[in-house]
Image (cartoon, grey):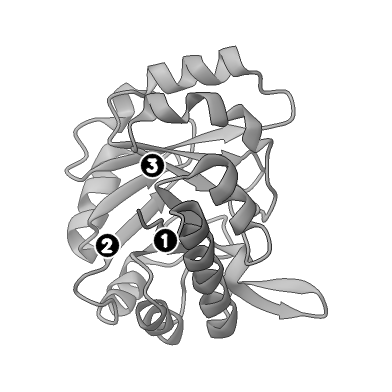
Amino acid sequence: MRTRIKFCGLTREADVEAAAEVGADAVGFVFFEKSPRAVSASRAKALARHVAPWMSIVGLFVNASASQIRALADEVGLSHVQLHGDETPEQCMHLGRPVIKAIRIDAQTQEPALVKSIQAYADCDALLFDADSEGFGGSGHSFDWSLIAPLASSLRGRWVLSGGLHEQSVSQAIALLAPPALDVSSGIELLQQGQTVKGVKDAQRMQAFMRAVAQADQERNGA
């Protein structure tokens, strides 16, 4: 089994092309104006022209209306919609694309509350587990992965792990949880004086991340 990879928060053509070159399965464009990685519809359309035909194009939204999501998805050519806000289960339906709903986890989250959230959004096509943050994701912070471990099998492979992933941490995540897919943003961004440049990806970090995932997959599969 191979772990699927989505690189999120891309803003440059070169980064989209690099994602294809290293073998990413999907790219994500952020349509949340307050995010430092946000892109406009016209910018996303330009970036989408550089996406390889076998890759998925995911749009990330935060508390947007259904009409906004559907219109932008059609304009850009999104294959999936990822919702990171406070959307209700009803608001996740009838968006014209498969929906990935983010479940935000903080230090106070307990398993019963997490189970309740999973059940509430069971009709979504997939769930994404991320660390809670003021910016609705992309913080580079992780959460207690052990909360997911006893619940993973019940999700039937329809989930994504995000938050605090990078080339050094991803092998531990795969060994512990065997997630079907990973979503990474800050973990592949350019580092300047130890700080990430949000929205600017680093092709070498992309390649290092993919190598780390491949190695972890081999170890998990006993190869």
Q: Quadrant of residue 138?
A: bottom right
**In the rendered structure, which disc, 2 or 3, sits on the residue that comes first in sequence?**
2
- Write down the residue under mark 1: 6
Asked if the residue under mark 1 is in contact with the one under mark 2, i.e. CB atoms within 8 Å, the reply is yes
The vertical placement of 193 against 114, above or below, is: below
Residue 163 appears in view = no
The vertical placement of 9 against 141, above or below, is: below
Residue toward you, 27 or 148: 148
- Write down the residue under mark 3: 64
Whole-percent x and y of residue 73? 23, 55
**In the rendered structure, which disc, 2 or 1, sits on the residue that comes first in sequence?**
1
Helix, strand or loop under label 1? strand
- Write down the residue under mark 2: 56
Residue name at image x 49 percent, y 52 percent: 220
Residue type for callout 3: Ala
Residue type for callout 2: Ser
Is residue 164 left or right of 56 when viewed as pictured?
A: right
**In the rendered structure, which disc, 3 or 1, sits on the residue that comes first in sequence?**
1
Residue name at image x 28 percent, y 47 percent: 69
* Cα distance in 3D space between marks 3 and 1: 22 Å
Q: Residues within 10 Å of mark 1 (few under 14, many from 20)?
A: many
Q: Which-is-in-front pick, marks 3 and 1?
A: 1
Residue name at image x 27 percent, y 51 percent: 80
